[in-house]
Image (cartoon, grey):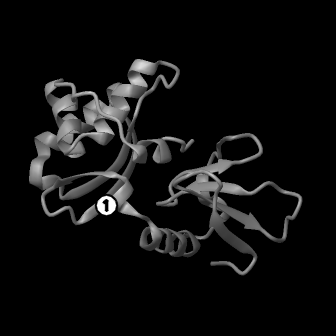
Amino acid sequence: MRPNIQSRRAPFANFYVAIDRRKLASPPWAFNENVSVLFDTQWRRPVPGGFAALTEADAERIRHQLMRELDTGKFVQIRYGTGRRKLFMYTAFDCPWCLKLEQRLTALGSRADVSLYFIPDTLNRADPARQQMAESLYCAPDPGAAWKNWMIKRIPPPVATCPAFAAVKEYP
């Protein structure tokens, strides 16, 4: 990593903050575990051009460090094939594009060769019924199967709650 750029865990789950010590007046950047999303914390929006401020080598070092530290046990996991590649996603059960991705991965089956890691969410967090659905998917005895049953077969999971969901749902 560049000596002038320092990273640390952000105050919200699953994100980190990078600070350029040369520009003390500038706000820090927030980025996700796989260093693919960069947010301007002052304006709370994605930065056009993403990580252009970091070299490819810097971003790769940050990505590897974060992947080693990531607690995958907090995520729902679905494996296609050997699951050699890891994909951490922000996904919602009521998202039409997320549904298309699930349908495509299911069609590919083992040829996809990917392990998906995610925390179920909803596009409408103001709706208590949708929040409950996201929690039921996460807290199901087999959350991966519950997710696939809903996304592919449209079979809703039984209503479930668990303390772990309260801890993970507060990401941005």
Q: Which residue is mark 1?
A: 86
Occupied quadrant, residue 161 = top left
Q: Residue 83 in the image: x percent, y percent?
A: 20, 61
Q: Is residue 56 left or right of residue 135?
A: right
Q: Is residue 25 left or right of residue 72?
A: right
Q: Residue 33 in the image: x percent, y percent?
A: 49, 60
Occupied quadrant, residue 122 = top left
Residue depicted at 54% across the width and 52% down the height: 13
Q: Quadrant of the N terminus?
A: bottom right
Q: Is residue 165 left or right of residue 146?
A: right
- Neighbour class for label 1 at 10 Å: few (<14), some, many (≥20)? some
Q: Is residue 95 visible?
A: no
Q: Is residue 23 above or below residue 128?
A: below
Q: Is residue 107 above or below residue 150?
A: below
Q: Residue 20 in the image: x percent, y percent?
A: 77, 67
Q: Looking at the picture, which amino acid does disc 1 mark?
A: Lys
Residue depicted at 36% across the width and 34% down the height: 135
Q: Residue 88 in the image: x percent, y percent?
A: 38, 53
Label 1 sits on a secondary structure element that is strand
Q: Residue furthest bottom?
A: 3
Q: Quadrant of the C terminus?
A: top right
